[in-house]
Image (tube, rainbow, N blue to C red):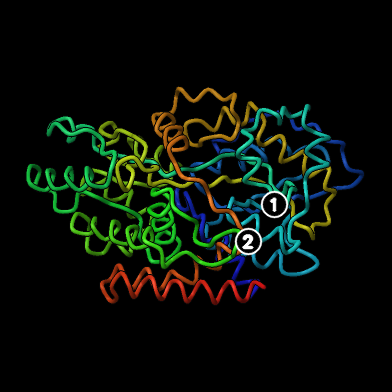
Amino acid sequence: MAVGLLAASLALTACGAGSRTGAATATKVACDFTNPASATTINVLAYNSSAVDPFSNTMVASCTHDNVTVKHDPIDFAGQLEKTTATLAGDSGTYDVVETYTYAIPDLASRGKLAPLDDLYAKNKDKYALGDLDPNTLKSMTYDGKLYGLPMQSQLLVMAYRKDLFDKNGLTPPTTFEELRTDAKKLQEAEGMKYPVALPLLSTADLDTAFAAALGSQDSAFFVNPDTKKPNFTQEPTAKALEQLKSLLPYMDPQVTTFDQPKVQQQLYNGKAAVAVMFSGRMNDLVQQKNTKLYDKFGFAAPPAVFEGGKAYSTVSTDGWSIPFNTKVDKDLLFEVIGASVSQEASQASVPAAFPARTTVDQSASPYAAATKDSLAKGPTKEIQPYVPAVSEAIRPVLANYMAGKIDVGEAQSQMQAAAEKVMAAQK
């Protein structure tokens, strides 16, 4: 069960998994640790993506000197998930630094899989100007009052749209799902575009994320009432979230429940879709000429609200560095390494590929930073609890069956409630 929970918590935040940037993104920064007496290898586990690579590459390039060698082998998100589960399973692990996420922290920390960083943070705060990290990102790496991850960058849902087609047809970026449907219908009629909308609704974590964003957009209750610990899926906001997600299906490819974020990107690359909502870590890929001939045709905005006056259809996930409980490497040394990787210089160099956790970074070079900030300001409050990954995994098959038309809204609510109640009973 513990392995399953870890897999679920990690899978929830495969934000930018798949995209890559090369080692050329490595920026040399100061990494001034006390040289260990003997040769020391630090193994780093982090998946390759446009938003994460600048930090992991900088860590390797800057902190490999004297008796220290920092190693990071290329890996995709599925491989990282598998290796994270394995390295944290026993008293001795393979990795000394692991990338973690907002949703993973409560589960891993509550089971004692990560080392608390509070003392190390206080010791190195001035040296690495850690006070410049956004307090909200630090909070998202905290569980039960203790810090378990040093944030590097955040990813939020952002809307990308074909500005040229919107301008041509007198359209503005939609601010509600109703406007999104209206815009999509206009594009179908005027441009002959069969499926103008693309969302990552793969029947794994992508579908969970979409449902949570639609629920949160209504400023509704969380999956589970944090006080009573009772699931909320029989309430009206759940029905509305399900109905509104399904209302977009006529404007999306019939295979949309097989779409992960790379497939959504492809829909935009080849001009088959005109508007999409994905994590911000994907946005820089859209404006690269090597990826698509439409690289200069995209605009960016905060996602629409499900209903007028509601929160944005958004969510935020912060990526950070954590130290496994079972590493044999000196934790002071490890914190120096991760501190250097999120320094001002390293964070600045990650723009525009990433949306860094530092508030002092100049993001004027990023074409999507303003939209990301707007998404953050307009988005819902996050539900961050140890049980959220397990509840999400439990309701996932129900969401998939509903989107496939196998069950109606009422049956979906009933099944989601029962599945979540079973999870919560096991938590006691």
In the depicted structure, whether residue 131 falls above or below residue 137: above
Q: Name the residue: 49% across, 61% down.
A: 223
| Residue labelled with disc 2 | 386
Q: Amino acid at mark 1?
A: Tyr
Pointers 1 and 2 in contact (CB under 8 A)? yes
Q: Specify which label sits upstream in the sequence, 1 or 2.
A: 1
Q: Amino acid at mark 2?
A: Pro
On screen, residue 112 versus residue 83, left or right, reads right
The residue most toward the right is 37
Q: Residues within 10 Å of mark 1 (few under 14, many from 20)?
A: many
Q: Residues within 10 Å of mark 2 (few under 14, many from 20)?
A: many
In the depicted structure, whether residue 362 falls above or below residue 336: above
| Residue labelled with disc 1 | 143
Q: Nearer the viewer, residue 173 or 27?
A: 173
Q: Name the residue: 92% across, 44% down.
A: 37
Q: Name the residue: 74% across, 56% down.
A: 114
Percent x, y for residue 76?
Answer: 52, 57
Q: Name the residue: 56% across, 38% down.
A: 54
The image quadrant of residue 246 is bottom left
On screen, residue 256 versus residue 374, left or right, reads left
The image quadrant of residue 372 is top left
Cα separation, mark 1 vs mark 2, equals: 9 Å
On screen, residue 291 versus residue 80, left or right, reads left
Percent x, y for residue 352?
Answer: 47, 31
Residue 397 seen from this side: yes
Q: Nearer the viewer, residue 362 or 174?
A: 174
